[in-house]
Image (cartoon, rainbow, N blue to C red):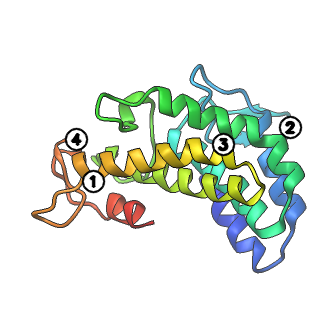
Amino acid sequence: IGDLRLEALANYYTFDSIPIVKRCLYLFAAAERNEYGILPGFVYENPCFYSGKWFLIDYSLMFICSLCDLYSHAGDDETFRDLYPIAKSILDVLDSTKDGDGLVTAESGSAFIDWCPGLFKSSSLEGIYLYTLDRWCETLESIGENDGAELYRARLEQGRISARKYLYDEKNGTFINERDKYQYSVHPASWMVL
């Protein structure tokens, strides 16, 4: 799913093949989800349909971003509304598994973020979650789903408050914290900027 998003964004400004992006989104939507409703990280369709048992929160969030990107680029209201229940379910499940500080954590499921061994991921995952919520709210507002947008906008604002309170180190001016063992990393900084 991570590759899908990057390839789709490049596709919009090169070949602009909307059908292939839609096809990929539907392939992931058809895959079996785990007990938390999280999508698998990959699917194969040849020689037969197979979805991996590698379920990653950040990849599921990228599915939602890819859906929002498709709507933003192509105005594909039909595909957005068709896949809306899956995207909504992912966001609602993640909201229900937040910790006492109101943060999505790698402990509530696995996350990839990067191949880097030893990388702590809590702050990066929160940044991806907040970025996704922001894209989701923009898209809901674009299609006139203002009631839904208000609910997710409130979650976004609460998440931003929690991230600033628990993940940001004002003294160092960056996102280092106890949850990530005070590890300096470009990953959470980048996602929080986005």
- State the separation of the CA atoms marked 2 and 3: 40 Å
- Residue 138: x and y, percent? 64, 59
Q: Could you tell which of marks 4 and 3 lies nearer the N-terminus?
A: 3
> Hey, which quadrant is residue 97 in on the image?
top left
- State the separation of the CA atoms marked 1 and 4: 13 Å
190 relative to 89 in the view: left or right: left
Query: Is label 2 in a helix, a strand or a loop?
Result: loop
Which residue in the rendered view is the most extreme toward the top?
35
185 relative to 151 in the view: left or right: left
- Residue 180: x and y, percent? 23, 45
Asked whether the residues under the numbered discs 1 and 3 touch, taking CB atoms below 8 Å apart as contact, a structural biologist would say: no
Residue 179: which numbered mark, if any? 4
Q: Nearer the viewer, residue 177 or 114?
A: 177
Disc 4 packing (10 Å; few <14; some 14–19; many ≥20): some
Q: Which residue is mark 2?
A: 47
- Residue at 15%, 50% in the rendered image: 182
Asked whether the residues under the numbered discs 4 and 2 touch, taking CB atoms below 8 Å apart as contact, a structural biologist would say: no
Q: Which residue is mark 1?
A: 164
Q: Which residue is mark 3?
A: 148
- Amino acid beneath label 1: Arg
Asked whether the residues under the numbered discs 1 and 4 touch, taking CB atoms below 8 Å apart as contact, a structural biologist would say: no
- Residue 188: x and y, percent? 34, 58
- Amino acid beneath label 3: Gly
